[in-house]
Image (cartoon, grey):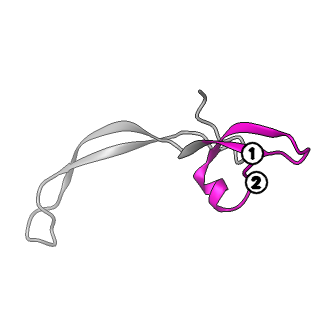
Amino acid sequence: MARICAITGKRPTTGSIIHRKGQSKKSGGIGTHVTKTTKRKFRPNLQRIKVRLPSGQVKRLWVCVKAIKAGLVEKA
């Protein structure tokens, strides 16, 4: 399954997790330091739902929840 929304075209994007060490200056330390960064993925929240297409046809599609909440799809 490709993790792509059939309506909006949303797809996974990459980012990173930043690990920090040390006490913040605000709480009396010398500041936090970055010790490690790790790659990660942000995946869209996809749900497989029955959608009524403009032609009247009913089809099962992978749709992101943001599109469902916004009313971009008509559930069958």
Instruction: Say left or right for 59 vs 54.
Output: left
Q: Position of residue 19 (x, y in %)?
A: 24, 46
Q: CA distance from mark 2 to mark 1?
A: 6 Å
Question: Which residue is denoted by mark 2 in the rendering?
Answer: 74
Q: Nearer the viewer, residue 18 or 63?
A: 63
Look at 63% across and 37% down and name the residue there: 4
* Magenta span of residues: 48-76
Q: Is residue 15 magenta?
A: no
Look at 57% across and 43% down and name the residue there: 46
Asked if labels 1 and 2 touch by Cβ distance under 8 angstroms, the answer is: yes
Q: Position of residue 26 (x, y in %)?
A: 16, 72
Q: Position of residue 6 (x, y in %)?
A: 71, 40
Q: Quadrant of residue 1?
A: top right
Question: Which residue is denoted by mark 1 in the rendering?
Answer: 51
Q: Tell me the tag on residue 18.
A: none
Q: Is residue 59 magenta?
A: yes
How many numbered marks, from 0 up? 2
SS state under label 2: loop
The amino acid pointed to by label 2 is Glu
